[in-house]
Image (cartoon, rainbow, N blue to C red):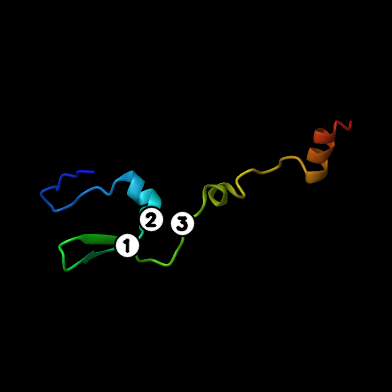
């Protein structure tokens, strides 16, 4: 993965790396320089990213009750 550094010294963290580390806008990260010249990137904030299911929780309003859904799946009228 090659990146180009901007004039401001910025690079874009590849999506695959952001997804792997759970980096979202506002997340805190830290760069660490190893003795052999390698650089590591770690997420430093304690907050875990919301799972895709957690992000959807509570957005559906006024749907069927559990009993109504069960009746439909059982073929009850």
Mark 2 surroundings: few (<14), some (14-19) or many (≥20) residues within 10 A:
some
Marks 3 and 1 sit apart, C-alpha to C-alpha, by 14 Å
Q: Considering only order in the chain, which callout, 2 or 1, is on the residue closer to the N terminus?
A: 2
Residue beneath disc 3? 49
At 32% from the left and 62% from the top, the residue drawn is 42
- Foreground disc of the pair 3, 1: 1
Find numbered disc 1 in the image and state the secondary structure of the residue it sits on.
Answer: strand
Q: Mark on residue 74?
A: none
Q: Considering only order in the chain, which callout, 2 or 3, is on the residue closer to the N terminus?
A: 2
At 78% from the left and 45% from the top, the residue drawn is 66
Left or right of residue 26, residue 6 in this image: left
The C terminus appears in which quarter of the rendering?
top right
Left or right of residue 23, residue 33 in this image: left
Picture quadrant of residue 1: top left
Q: Mark on residue 21?
A: 2
Mark 3 surroundings: few (<14), some (14-19) or many (≥20) residues within 10 A:
some
**Residue 59 appears at what percent x and percent y?**
60, 45
From this viewpoint, which residue is outermost toward the front? 36
Mark 1 surroundings: few (<14), some (14-19) or many (≥20) residues within 10 A:
few
Marks 3 and 2 sit apart, C-alpha to C-alpha, by 9 Å
Find numbered disc 3 in the image and state the secondary structure of the residue it sits on.
Answer: loop
Find numbered disc 2 in the image and state the secondary structure of the residue it sits on.
Answer: helix
- Foreground disc of the pair 3, 2: 2
Q: Considering only order in the chain, which callout, 1 or 3, is on the residue closer to the N terminus?
A: 1
At 21% from the left and 60% from the top, the residue drawn is 39
Residue beneath disc 1? 42
């Amino acid at each position: 993965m090659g990146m180009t550094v901007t004039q401001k010294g910025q690079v874009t963290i590849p999506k695959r790396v952001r997804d792997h580390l759970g980096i979202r806008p506002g997340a805190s990260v830290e760069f660490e320089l190893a003795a052999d010249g390698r650089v590591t990137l770690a997420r430093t904030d304690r907050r875990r990213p919301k799972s895709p299911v957690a992000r959807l929780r509570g957005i559906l309003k006024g749907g069927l009750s559990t009993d109504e859904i069960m009746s439909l799946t059982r073929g009850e009228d």
